[in-house]
Image: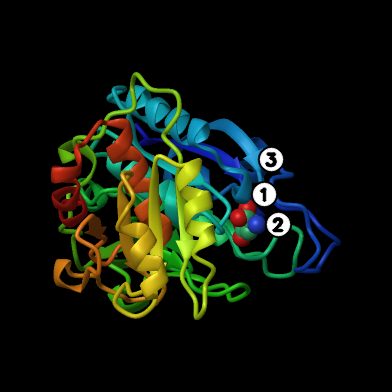
Amino acid sequence: MKKKVIILATGGTIAGVGEEGKIVGYIPGSIAVDDLIAAMPKLKDVADIEALQICNINSDDITDKIWIRLANTINELSKDPNVVGFVVTHGTDTMEETAYFLNLTIKTDKPVVFTGSMRPATSISADGYMNLYEAVCVATSNEAREKGVLVVFSDCIFAARTVTKTSTYHVTAISSSGMGAIGIVRDGDVYLYASPSKCHTTKSLFDVKSIDKLPKVSLLYFYADADPGLLEYAAKSSDGIVIAGAGAGEFSESYKSIIEKFNIPVVVCSRIDGGIIFKENLLCDNTVAADNLSPQKATVLLRLALACKIDRQNLQEIFMKY
Ligand code: ASP
């Protein structure tokens, strides 16, 4: 009996349609998942495919409601012993946030593999078909179990916590910067070389079974002579704040004097790709160091921590653990 893989489609460039042969000026989230699968008959040689259209949108329109629906759908469907793994097709812009959210909230050891593409399905040498094929191969792999959520892109396998988009146009845009890939796919065979060490999936405390939305967190990017009024404005309408500071999470004296007065949690990251913030780097006692989490992923973890009522004392520990 062939293994069963469920593809959950959300849209993005992999389902994008534009002028035949062209790369720019297309509309993401235009092709239905059944048509995407029909264009890749080789998928059926790898697994029995079941498809679910979760939404069909540009990933810049992804919301907390879609994240929660994805997590709860995977948690429910993973109970089926015939299902060996899942593939999530997603736009590349915010793929890293959704992958990290699922990494923290799904309760299965079965592979959950994200993929997408940089070129629309109607372009010359569209990369989506190969990426989808390789993602399905990884979803059927026994070796890919217990690795947390994975992202497969351009023959490489990345871990959800460290994956990020690093280019606006390269077909290798999805990568892991300094942390690198944890494996590769070649002719459908999966080669894994490392395992993520931070807490994820079945060991994670985060559960979204009984919530339908997440608290609001604002992300502010510090830059030379940044207006501190932005901080006060954001704090008024947010449950928490993430700051992408300069260097090792630094900001101006005027930022510091405002942040010190905040009663809502403030998490400090670096605007540098590859930045690590240690507790010793913190300029204000009431802030939390994000370790090496990117600012956009820190918003995901902070929203979940607030949703699960993690108190301020334990927030730093959460950011070291996840
Ligand atoms: N804007 C697109 C999206 O994220 C880009 C892509 O998929 O590559 O949906």
Real-space CA distance between mark 1 and mark 2, rounded to the nearest whole angstrom: 6 Å
Of residues 149 and 32, the one nearer the viewer is 149
Residue at 59% x, 47% y is 41
> Which residue lies under the disc numbered 3?
35
Instruction: Kindly tell me whether mark 3's CB lies below 8 Å from ligand 1.
Output: no
Residue depicted at x 48% and y 43%: 236
Q: How many marks?
A: 3
Residue 66 locus on image (x, y percent): 52, 33
Q: Which residue is mark 1?
A: 15
Q: Amino acid at mark 1?
A: Ala
Say few, some or many: other residues with alpha carbon within 10 Å of mark 3 (under 14 / 14 to 19 / 20 or more).
few
Residue located beneath label 2 in the image: 121
Give the alpha-carbon distance from disc 2 to disc 3, as whole Å: 11 Å
Disc 1 secondary structure class: helix
Label located before the other in sequence (2 or 3)? 3
- Label whose residue precedes the other's in the sequence (1 or 3): 1
In this rendering, the label closer to the viewer, 1 or 3? 1
| Disc 2 element | loop
Q: Position of residue 313 (x, y in %)?
A: 13, 44
Callouts 1 and 2 close, C-beta under 8 Å = yes
Q: Which quadrant of the rendered structure holds the N terminus? A: top left
Q: Position of residue 130 (x, y in %)?
A: 54, 61
Give the residue type that dot 3 points to: Asp
The amino acid type of the residue labelled 2 equals Ala
Query: On residue 280, which mark appears?
Result: none
The quadrant where ligand 1 appears is bottom right
Q: Secondary structure at mark 3?
A: helix
